[in-house]
Amino acid sequence: MTMTADEAKEFYGADAAEWLKRWDTGQGVWSIEMGGLGPGYEQCIQITTAELLRHLLTNTVAIPKEGDKKGWEKVSDELREAMFKVPTISALGLSGAQYGAAYNLAWHLYRRGPAVCFMDKEVQDRKIQVRKHFPRAA
């Protein structure tokens, strides 16, 4: 059964702001597995994705045109600098690969929205549910 666009928006979140609101309130949200190296590694990516998304939604970020390599490098450098000032992010001890995966996912969520991103055929076998608070054994 194929999901309609409206159903996808309700299921995954209508836009990046709704996805982040669900994350912030501790709800489970749909995402894409980006690391493939286990839950702890993946959680770091998802936390960083949420914080990058928060920055993109609450700050004016000039989005360069496609192909503007220098413009994208500038935005990338500014975001990296801003992210590593966030105590939660700096405490994670991210690898460059983790940060890069989070950066990529955050931009897709920001520019395309979760409903569109998570309906892509290329990611159907990588969809996961995540939440802000990582589960702990009692």
Image: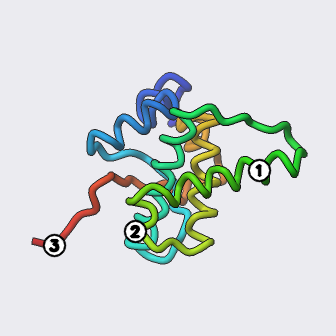
The residue at which mark 1 appears reads as 74
Instruction: Check disc 3 and report its element: helix, strand or loop.
Output: loop
User: How many badges with numbers are in the image?
Assistant: 3
Name which residue type carries label 1: Lys
Q: CA distance from mark 1 to mark 3?
A: 42 Å
For residue 59, side relative to residue 76 (left or right): left
* Depicted 125 relative to depicted 58: above or below: below
The mark found on residue 131 in the picture is none
Q: Is residue 34 left or right of residue 72?
A: left
The amino acid type of the residue labelled 2 equals Ala
Q: Which dot, 3 or 2, sits closer to the camera?
A: 2
Tell me: residue 134, above or below residue 120. Answer: below
Residue 23, image x, y percentages: 35, 43
Q: Residues within 10 Å of mark 2 (few under 14, many from 20)?
A: few
Q: CA distance from mark 3 to mark 2?
A: 22 Å
Quarter that holds the C terminus = bottom left
For label 1, the SS is helix
Q: Residue at x 50, y 22 (%)?
A: 6
How far across and down, in percent of the image, does residue 135 sit?
23, 64
Quick one: label 1, few (<14), some, or many (20+) residues within 10 Å? few
Q: Which residue is mark 3?
A: 137
Q: Name the front one of labels 1 and 3.
A: 1
Instruction: Pick whichever of labels 1 and 3 is earlier in the sequence.
Output: 1
Question: Circles 1 and 3: CB distance less than 8 Å?
Answer: no
Q: Quadrant of residue 90?
A: bottom left
The residue to which callout 2 is attached is 91
Q: Which is more toward the observer, 23 or 56?
A: 56
